[in-house]
Amino acid sequence: MRNIWKSLFISPSILVATLILNATSVAAETVATSENIEEEALGQVTSVSQFSDVQPTDWAFQALQSLVERYGCIAGYPNSTFRGNRALTRFEFAAGLNACLDRMNELIAVATSNVGSGDLNTIKRLQSEFSTELATLRGRVDAIEARTAKLEANQFSTTSKLEGEVVIAATNVFEGNTPDKNTTLGARARINFVSSFTGKDTLYARIQANNIPDVDEAALAFAGDADTNAYLDGLWYSFPLTKSTNVIAIANAGAADDIVDTVNQFDGDGTEGALSSFGTRNFIYYQVEGSGLGITQELGDSLSLSVGYLASENNQAGPGNGLFQGSYAALAQLTFEPSKSFKVGLTYINGYDEPGQTDNDSYGVQATVGLGDKLVLGGWGGYSNVRDVNSNQEEDTWSWAVTLGLPDFGKKGNTAGVIFGMNPKVTDSNVPGFVKPDTSYHIEGFYQHKVNDNISITPGVIWVTAPGNDKNNDDAIVGTLRTTFTF
């Protein structure tokens, strides 16, 4: 072996000497460096067989195959045989050998198998020839086990998932009656705790802080209270009562979209989709808020019925408050979805507003239809009849909208959207001055650019004509740039 190494080192020495005689001093330095690299590389090679695959005709392959067939030490195949007609890399072979050695050790330890001396010698020879690969493999396994133990020790919970979301919005009112036309910058941060105890139920809790200021003439879907105090913004528990019945119990800050599908392609709760509250969902849904219960019953593969009851002063025990004596909204919706490209919802809401001493009946229809993969049309119409409980005064309010969505516009994951509709308008009332001759329209356009799976940027413009259904009011034009981070 020593003579072999001498011959290996003599060859590069002769090469270096030859180059020194025919090159400049700079070239000599380069050759010297090459010599050092070559010597180091040669020093790492102990056997040419390290680069050889294990062939089915090799003794090692046949020896392991014999051990497997006699002792069943690898159960990778249904009949516990080790077979194959292709070459294995040395690490692939070592993985199978390691599994077999572990099993053989178990058999020897419990004396359930009489292992002959010939087989023991074969095992020792295999261990010796593949010692490097076995050591590397076991080192990697130990490293993976250590990482797994670290993850288990530091994970948040075995049943809970922590989610985060941050919305940063820059907004400016370019036109309108409001004197506040300075550019604003605000943020909404949410931390969501999503837990499950059975794998089918969900306990959801959300903590939020939001200082994004709202716009009076064009309410934003992601605006808050203009402060940075963190508070519990959502708490509910959902579970399947039967295979076709799901129940949701809402303890805090519930909304209609917690109980029913609002059937709007742009309802992203301010995180994505529409920039305005008007463009997010039918106006009749906004009276549904508070704490209560919701039930959804599947009536076949394409039809479902959802009912719910939410009270907004549920945690106050004084007169005109509580779960049943204060403001409330009771909702029922039939949702029909015969295919992924078509959905329609029929909604009825009965509500009572304690501060205003009014009750109402509201009706809505919402629909979306996909015209291919690149075009989605949608819209809704809403009607509400509001009555004063202490008199015979009442009013009828209408609103409608149409939406146009272009999924994957410009790039996969991006969305372009246009919303046009009539803001809520009193069309009939026995109260003088409630019906106005003018009509306010809402026009909104946005483009949601998906930077990656966790970041999106959405610039958009909102134009409201005749705010308050009064043409004497200047049109409001609002520009906003929303950036959303999810993690």
Image (spheres, helix red, strand yellow):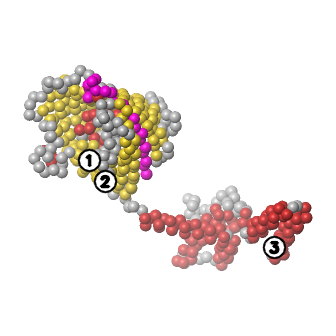
Structural crowding at the residue carrying mark 2, measured as other residues with C-alpha within 10 Å and reported as few (<14), some (14–19) or many (≥20): few
Tell me the distance, in whole angstroms, between the alpha carbons under discs 3 and 1.
79 Å
Q: Is residue 338 visible?
A: no
Gap between marks 2 and 1 measured at Cα: 14 Å
At 27% from the left and 37% from the top, the residue drawn is 285
Q: Which residue is mark 2?
A: 230
Could you tell me residue 265's position as x and y percent? Answer: 38, 35
Q: Position of residue 31 (x, y in %)?
A: 82, 63
Q: Earlier in the sequence, mark 2 or mark 1?
A: 2
Q: Are marks 2 and 1 in contact (CB under 8 Å)?
A: no
Q: Quadrant of residue 284?
A: top left
364 left or right of 478 in image: left
Is 481 covered by the magenta stretch? yes
Residue type, mark 3 in image: Trp
Q: Residues within 10 Å of mark 1 (few under 14, many from 20)?
A: some
- x and y percent of residue 252 in the render? 25, 50
Is 220 situated left or right of 322 in this image?
right
Q: Residue furthest top?
A: 437
Residue 253: give its label.
1
In the picture, measured across the screen, residue 459 lies left or right of residue 47, that is left
Which range of residues does the magenta coloring cover?
A: 468-487
Residue at image x 55%, y 69%?
A: 142
- Tag shown at residue 118: none
Q: Earlier in the sequence, mark 3 or mark 2?
A: 3
- Residue at the spot of label 3: 5
The residue nearer to you, when weighing 455 against 260, is 455
Residue 442 image offset from top left, x and y in percent: 34, 29
**Residues under numbered marks 3 and 2 in contact, where contact means CB atoms less than 8 Å apart:** no
